Amino acid sequence: MYAKWRWIARRIFKRIWFRATLFSLLGVVSALVSVGLRQYIPDSMSTKIGADAVDNILGIIASSMLAVTTFSLSTMVSAYGSATGNATPRATSLLVEDATTQNALSAFIGSFLFSLVGIITLSTGAYGSKGRVVLFIVTIGVIILIVYTLLTWIDHLSRLGHLGETTDRVEGAAKGAIMDRARRPYMGGRAFPAGSSLPLTARPLYARKIGYVQLIDMPSLRKISDKTSGHIYVHAIPGTFAETTMPIAWVDDIDAHQEEGIIAAFVIGTRRSYEQDPRFGVSVMAEIASRALSPAVNDPGTAIDVIGRGIRVFSLLANPGDAPPKSPECARVFVRGIDLQDVFDDFFAPIARDGAGTVEVGMRLQKALAALARIDSPGFRLAAQRHSALALQRAEMALSLESDKTRLRSLQVRSQDEFGNIASWRQ
């Protein structure tokens, strides 16, 4: 269960309470460690620093950091609400995991607790004259940290929650998942048998709860299959909505007591996750474009921008980078791959539907699909050709001006010519 626990640990590390707890503990330890280090301070130094100076500084830090933390929390909540309203609620999880925001809030809370513990300990007389010197030096370090964090936080606030910044984060998450899946099309396993040609002895395994498959612990499946010399056929890949009557996997020549371990390798939650689910990032990008095209927002420029981002994301499916595709790591684990047609449907169908009445969006769609059709990768030409025709059909039903329809038809016809001549161009 190594991959599963590593995934759980990674999710914990991204939670704001985890970093806040670490910074808070660091602040408390920093305040208390001054008591133990006082024996290393010479007497001559202790006479140069008065206790009043440390008291005043710690009082200022305690009062100001509490106010700054409260203000930062309200700003963060407002940014999340703005992202939900302007982009999509599915993008908010990426903002919650923002490292800069978490570090800023954690530093403010840690500094507040540091000053609070320092004031309490000073009032008990535990520091002594030498301990106050150490506390003063540590306090200067905390002030430097606060100043740096404030400058970083102010710069970050100018972008936090803005539509462009949110879209950048969604695009980045989609790219990461797409690149990983392009290099490992079957998540380290082998291709699922075509059609329904499973062994007659294969038996289904069902999910224990209802929700979306967020993670599949492939190392655990490999370990189980190697121990029993059996085969595992993974049907429910990340992003699949699983319920108790749908098989998530089939097994062949697997001991009955190992079946629970296979089921436990499927992490099922209430929401989809970006990490192992490339289609989710693509769907969220389409949601941002659809919201921009709604009558309440009426922002076709954002939809056109998202279409351009979609070209970058889709190109990674054909060319994931310089690293070659990884060879199968799990020889006895078979996993369903992602259907390219489904990915095209996730992205282009909603935008073509909601932007059918906007000729600018229709033109950008036709140009984007023509660009994807020129990618030398199996399935791209047919998928782009199908969506080009569908987008034109939707636009012809929604547009009222004949000249707009003619412009789209001319683009679609040229695209069809490109689809037919791609091979000759490459020769």
Image (cartoon, rainbow, N blue to C red):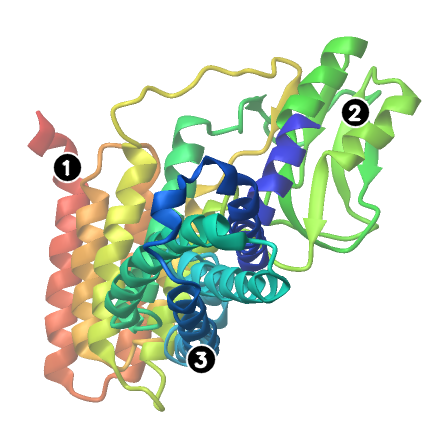
Q: Give, as a three-letter code, the residue at label 2.
A: Val
Percent from the top left, x then y, of residue 351? 34, 68
User: Looking at the rendering, which quadrant does residue 296 occupy?
Assistant: bottom left
Mark 3, secondary structure of its residue: helix
Residue shown at 16% from the left, 68% from the top: 363
User: Cβ–Cβ below 8 Å for labels 2 and 1?
Assistant: no
Q: Earlier in the sequence, mark 3 or mark 2?
A: 3
Relative height, residue 271 to residue 88 (above, below): above
Mark 2, secondary structure of its residue: strand
Single out the mark in the foreground, 1 or 3.
Answer: 3
Q: Earlier in the sequence, mark 2 or mark 1?
A: 2
Residue shown at 38% from the left, 59% from the top: 347
Looking at the image, can residue 349 be seen? no
Q: Give, as a three-letter code, the residue at label 3.
A: Ala
Percent from the top left, x then y, of residue 1? 71, 28
Mark sitting on residue 292: none
Relative height, residue 28 to residue 303 (above, below): above
Percent from the top left, x then y, of residue 146? 34, 61
Mark sitting on residue 67: 3
Residue shown at 64% from the left, 22% from the top: 219
Give the distance between the C-alpha atoms of the residues marked 1 and 3, in whole angstroms.
62 Å
Q: Give, as a three-letter code, the residue at label 1.
A: Ile
Give the distance between the C-alpha atoms of the residues marked 2 and 1, in whole angstroms.
43 Å
Towards the viewer: 392 or 375: 375
Relative height, residue 268 to residue 324 (above, below): below
Classed neighbour count for the residue bearing mark 3: other residues with Cα under 10 Å, few (<14), some (14–19), many (≥20) = few
User: Looking at the rendering, which quadrant does residue 364 occupy?
Assistant: bottom left
Percent from the top left, x then y, of residue 379? 35, 38
Residue occupied by mark 1: 422
Mark sitting on residue 251: 2
